[in-house]
Image (cartoon, rainbow, N blue to C red):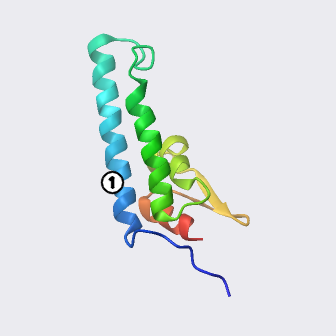
Amino acid sequence: MKRPKETICKKPKAVLCEVVRLKSEMDMWSDSITGLFGGDTESMGLRPPWRLFDAYLKQVEKVVGDDAGWVEWFVWENGCGAKALEAGRHGRMKPVRTVDDLVKLIKK
């Protein structure tokens, strides 16, 4: 019998929706800083907030029981679902467009 993945939180969807919301806020912050001062935020010494966000994502992965790095993939590679990239296990690939799709992927 396959043992279900253990998660600390009972509502991974709510946690992952918060990740998407915070990523959107970080993007808006980064865009406004770049708009005000021009150039790349990393070259302006503004890398620490993004490092904190990365650390946050790693903790979220633990909380939702993601041992494969799907949360980071969803945020960085898949643009929080905007790119609708395909992912899956055992050759069963499906587009991952929403947090619901991500939750299903993590639970597999």
> Residue at image x 73%, y 66%?
90
Residue 47, compared with residue 87, is above or below; it is above
Residue 71, image x, y percentages: 51, 53
Residue 58, image x, y percentages: 50, 49
The image quarter containing residue 31 is top left
Residue 100, image x, y percentages: 44, 65
Q: Residues within 10 Å of mark 1 (few under 14, many from 20)?
A: few
The image quarter containing residue 2 is bottom right
Report whether 30 appears left or right of 85: left
Tell how many labels.
Answer: 1
Residue 98, compared with residue 28, is above or below; it is below
Report whether 66 appears left or right of 17: right
Q: Compare residues 17 and 86 and report the one nearer the observer.
A: 17
Q: Which residue is mark 1?
A: 18
The image quarter containing residue 92 is bottom right
> Residue at image x 40%, y 17%?
45
Report whether 54 appears left or right of 33: right
Quarter of the image where the N terminus is located: bottom right
Q: Looking at the picture, which amino acid does disc 1 mark?
A: Glu
Residue 87, image x, y percentages: 62, 57
Going by the picture, which residue comes out furthest to the right?
91
Quarter of the image where the C terminus is located: bottom right
> Residue at image x 55%, y 70%?
107
> Residue at image x 51%, y 41%?
76
Q: Secondary structure at mark 1?
A: helix
